[in-house]
Image: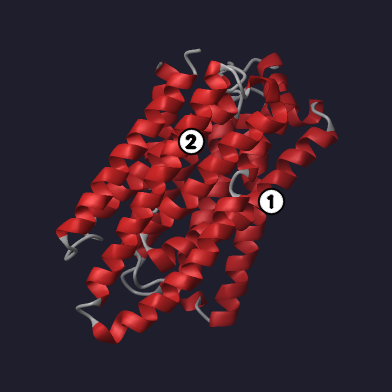
Amino acid sequence: MIWIAFAALGGILQGSFALPMKYTKKWKWENVWSMWSMWTLLIVPWIIGFLAIPNLLQVYAQSTFKSVFLVFFFGFIWGISAIAVGKGLDYLGLALGFSLIMGLVIAVGSILPLLIDNPQDILTQSGLRLIVGVIIVVAGMILSACAAVLKQKDIASSIQTGELRQHKSFATGLVICVVAGLTAPMLNYAFIYGDQLRITAENLGATKTLAPNAIWTIALFGGFIINFVYCMWLVRKNKTVNLYKEKGTGLYYLYTLIMGILWAGGISVYGMATANLGKLGPSIGWGIFFGMAIFWANFLGLIAKEWKGVKSKTYIIMTVGLIILLLGIYIIGWANSF
């Protein structure tokens, strides 16, 4: 059960990473996300990789080009999701954005590896419990999303001038979140198809628990390229380069570093958990990881007063949704015991 707890801890870290964005109001999205990309997808993963794995560069030298390329490729495609996540959270807020994105991520990222890599396990006790758990998590996600939509209506009803703009933002944000949810599971496939890198890292002295960090450095580097290039294009297009030096923004670099540590730390902990959860680890760990991320993001959204001024009905729906999410996470973890 300790690795189930690790997967949940990774989800808590993942669900927390966007909170510091609320305190970078003098920067535009591209300023925040460019620094997030630098810390999260380049600097922090390589620091973790070199600390966790002896002879990290030798791992890549001794692995096949195909293995390294596939990890990089899936990471690059996932990078599209990372951009969409950042934009989706910007449009819809921490609670609703995470609920929509991560619900799709859980469904696609948990079920597809089972269908493609272990189809013989679908009708086993573990496989059926996993599917039921994912369905329950998605149901909880839908309720959480409904509560967030009601929250927006509650607030918009008292601010008539902003109502139309909010509906426009919601429609755009919804499309962005769907794109994010459908492409995000590519990071799970980077982990699955990077198995040779993990095995090579173990052969060179890395422990089974820390060896997956050899995968994340390459996968996240692929994501870094598309995220950073896109942000720099926006900086140039919107002429926001001077905002990096705006008075009163010195702490923003620390905030984005915290975002990077939380996000990359969450992924690293998830990799440790999955490596120790058996052959269904990528499916079970993925469901727990992102299910907890949804729960925690909604909880932080509540703490951050995103739900201030809403009706009691909205609070009730939100609470029921979170309870269902926790139930689904428990069932996914339970599936690993069979």
| Residue 326, horizontal then vertical, whole percent | 33, 34
Q: Amino acid at mark 1?
A: Phe
Along the line of sight, which residue is nearer the eye, 99 or 289? Answer: 99
| Residue 51, horizontal then vertical, whole percent | 54, 28
In the displayed structure, 214 sits above or below 309; it is above
| Residue 78, horizontal then vertical, whole percent | 63, 50
SS assignment at label 2? helix
Q: Is residue 66 left or right of residue 97?
A: right
| Residue 41, horizontal then vertical, whole percent | 57, 48
The N terminus sits in image quarter: top left
User: Dividing the picture into quarters, in which one does residue 262 lie?
Assistant: top left
Q: Which residue is mark 2?
A: 134
Residue drawn at point x = 59 percent, y = 42 percent:
108
What label does residue 76 carry, if any? 1
Q: CB of mark 1 within 8 Å of CB of mark 2?
A: no
SS assignment at label 1? helix
Q: Residues within 10 Å of mark 2 (few under 14, many from 20)?
A: many
The mark tally for this picture is 2
Residue that sits furthest to the bottom in the current view:
161
Colouring scheme, one of rainbow, by chain, secondary structure, one colour: secondary structure
Q: Amino acid at mark 2?
A: Val
In the displayed structure, 197 sits above or below 13; it is above
The span from disc 1 to disc 2 (Cα, nearest Å) is 26 Å
**Dot 1 or dot 2, earlier in sequence:** 1
Along the line of sight, which residue is nearer the eye, 268 or 180? Answer: 180
Residue 262 visible in this rendered orientation of the protein: no
Q: Is residue 232 left or right of residue 323?
A: right
Nearer to us: label 1 or label 2? 2
